[in-house]
Amino acid sequence: MKVLVPVKRVVDFNVKIRVKADGTGVDLSNVKMSMNPFDEIAVEEAIRLKEAGKAEEVVVVSIGPAQAQETLRTALAMGADRAILIKVEDMVEPLAVAKLLKAVADAEGPRLVVLGKQAIDDDANQTGQMLSALLGWSQATFASAVALEGDKARVTREVDGGLQVIEVALPAIVTADLRLNEPRYASLPNIMKAKKKPLEEKTPADYGVNVDARLKVLKTEEPGTRKAGVKVASVAELLDKLKNEAGVLQF
Amino acid sequence: MAILLFAEHDNAALSDQTARTLTAARRIGGEIDILVAGKGAAAVAQAASAFQGVRKILLAEADALEHRLAEPAAALIVSLAGDYDTVIAPATTTGKNVLPRVAALLDVMQVSEIVEVVSADTFKRPIYAGNAIQTVQATDGKKVITVRTSGFEAAQAEGGSAPVETIGATADPRLSGFVENRLSESERPELASARIIVSGGRALGSEERFRQVILPVADKLGAAVGASRAAVDAGYAPNDWQVGQTGKVVAPELYVACGISGAIQHLAGMKDSKVIVAINKDEDAPIFQVADYGLVADIFDALPELERAL
Ligand SMILES: Cc1cc2nc3c(=O)[nH]c(=O)nc-3n(C[C@H](O)[C@H](O)[C@H](O)COP(=O)(O)OP(=O)(O)OC[C@H]3O[C@@H](n4cnc5c(N)ncnc54)[C@H](O)[C@@H]3O)c2cc1C
Ligand SMILES: Nc1ncnc2c1ncn2[C@@H]1O[C@H](COP(=O)(O)O)[C@@H](O)[C@H]1O
């Protein structure tokens, strides 16, 4: 069985981004970029399936600029076998990403696609569900445990009220939540080895997919900021403030 | 202009998140129909009919819809979508699971987690864990939208009498099956709609201490309980208590953060609370930068003292 894992290059989760003063977007110059954290979890899950003998090959794919190669090399260093970079100049929206991924899935024939549940830049949380729809496959989102059993997968999902267990027919889409696993760090020898693993470059035109944006971004602004308040010296003072100043406690 | 609102419920009761999404739908404007998809959910449809200004309630009941799994729920919505300009749902785990599937089947780019309606096709939504707010205009013929409900007041379910129309479900695509729910049982208010939230972080150190120190304060305040990712990952609190970028986004009147450092991913989930209290023994903890009232103290002293004083 082949497993496909889409990985996105995003601003590192530790960076506090800055909004451009003219409202045209977020300033990404000289900002540390990394693999989307949820995608690291997705890659880890695929590699574990391979290590457990349940998958033969792990193929990673990224839609992004030339530098997304680094993201793919990271995935290869973690243990993926092969990479595909679909080169684009601008940000591509989830719907277009899903269409490109569908084309890759049609060409590669994976039985399982594991994505992150959400990219931490656009916070869209759509791509996996969309890909599943376009392929006509089953979907198991927000996964915190995945067990393959024959031609089915039993997936535990993180839902609003707790956990939900579902069973999906393969081929399937799984999107990874934070607690699915703890991704490994790539060792130095594996980083060296990853440089020799195959990385194929493509363009959206190779797949005949139109990636024009459907959402027009009119403005990007800073959120309303909160001022730091005051420090209180004791629990008694805190209670007094909450009752008499903030008025949020009645008794 | 007509809007289809996909209701959040548990087959027994209508969620407050539906009422908040209705407020967003009203701002978009047009006739609003509410779709109740489920099984044995007639009482939910009845409850929804009490909202004013709703044209009708569509009730679809089937085994496959009992848990609103993505494939059958999306197929149902797509079968109805021809009559609507906009499909909208709260950004609950169900909404987030089902609506992008609907969007892709309609060849529409979804607008995720809106916090403001600017006009019928233009919305504000947070990106980068809420560190930037984007105004986007949807250019597709149909709009598919999920709503961050903490940004909208709940509409009152009273005074209305929208007719309930029973509709057939589409065939179950049989791609996935429900096995079980392991839901946290709790008498406490729900995080999404609580007036007060008491949250604990890694500092709690164990599940036992989380229960001993956080819960009594929450119970005295009639509060819901939240947690940081670190506390959930370590098993001190269940996953559905996580507040943040990838957990729940809340905006209560009072949020009390106990032994939480204030990482951007946590702030993303609570910084729109009306009043924020932080209790942390590190006076430089970033959480103090957003707190209205900060108490530099050991939570194991401060929280029992607070509980006694309430
Ligand atoms: C992709 C991604 C998504 C994430 N999503 C979320 C999310 O949704 N929600 C979330 O919360 N996090 C999220 N995180 C994690 C986030 O980055 C932080 O790691 C996490 O919020 C830290 O939790 P914490 O504040 O409890 O722990 P810590 O950062 O370890 O802070 C513990 C705090 O407790 C204080 N303390 C210790 N002992 C005491 C004591 N006895 N009395 C008083 N204070 C004490 C310390 O001074 C410290 O400030 C995410 C991370 C990533 C990468
Ligand atoms: N440009 C991209 N390249 C590769 N994978 C992507 C890309 N955009 C999104 N994805 C995948 O889709 C998931 C969800 O992204 P999103 O829907 O944008 O929140 C990510 O975690 C990735 O696995």
Image (spheres, coloured by chain):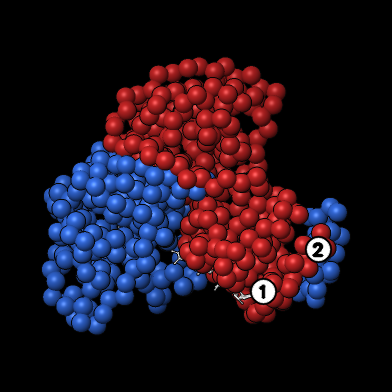
Chain colours: A blue, B red
* Amino acid, disc 2: Arg
* Amino acid, disc 1: Asn
Q: Residue lying furthest bottom in this view?
A: A188
Q: Is residue B24 above or below residue B289?
A: above
Of discs 1 and 2, which sits in the foreground? Answer: 2
Q: In the image, is A34 to the left or to the right of A218?
A: left
Q: Are marks 1 and 2 in contact (CB under 8 Å)?
A: no
Task: Tell me residue A114's x, y (percent).
Answer: 28, 54
- Residue A244 in which image quadrant: bottom right
Q: Residue at x 52, y 30 (%)?
A: B11
- Residue A189 in which image quadrant: bottom left
- Provide the residue designation for mark 2: B308
The quadrant the C terminus of chain A occupies is bottom right
Pointer 1 local density, CA inside 10 Å: few below 14, some 14–19, many at least 20: many
Pointer 2 local density, CA inside 10 Å: few below 14, some 14–19, many at least 20: few
Q: Residue lying furthest front in this view?
A: B208
* Nearer to the camera, B221 or A87: B221
